[in-house]
Image (tube, rainbow, N blue to C red):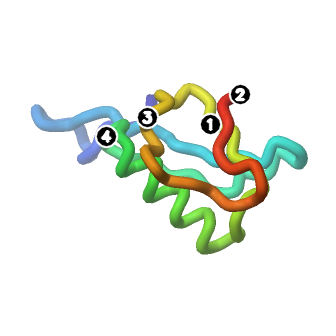
Amino acid sequence: MGPFVPFPKIDRSVRAKLFLIVDDHSRLIVDGRFYAHENARACQDLLRHAICHRGLPGVLYPENVPRNIFGNYVVGGDRGITSA
């Protein structure tokens, strides 16, 4: 759980959720951001930003993410998105 958005806390505030993309081999944090809502748009936004800055990953292993969150979003490489 992250900080309240907006801060300082008011009646309409919600807890921010931290989304991270971590390289499994080097443990490099490729990208990470706080989002107010935990949904497919937040995942896709973070993934799009990471791909623009670091390039396409060979394989993406989503963890703690429902299988349908990516929809038809296919990531490059020869194996694409797989479940861990």
Q: Residues within 10 Å of mark 3 (few under 14, many from 20)?
A: few
Between disc 4 and disc 3, whose residue precedes?
4
Residue 47 seen in render: yes
Vertical comparison of 32 with 39: above or below: below
Disc 3: which residue: 68
* Quarter of the picture holding the C terminus: top right
What amino acid type should be assigned to the residue bearing mark 4? His
Disc 4: which residue: 37
Vertical comparison of 33 with 56: above or below: above
Q: Residues within 10 Å of mark 2 (few under 14, many from 20)?
A: few
Tell me which residue sits at (59%, 45%) in the image.
20
Between disc 2 and disc 4, whose residue precedes?
4
Q: CA distance from mark 3 to mark 2?
A: 14 Å
Measured from the top left, where is residue 32 in percent x and y?
57, 52
Q: Residues within 10 Å of mark 1 (few under 14, many from 20)?
A: some
What amino acid type should be assigned to the residue bearing mark 1? Pro
Which residue occupies the extreme left position in the image? 11
Q: CA distance from mark 3 to mark 1?
A: 11 Å
Vertical comparison of 45 with 62: above or below: below
Disc 1: which residue: 62
Between disc 1 and disc 4, whose residue precedes?
4
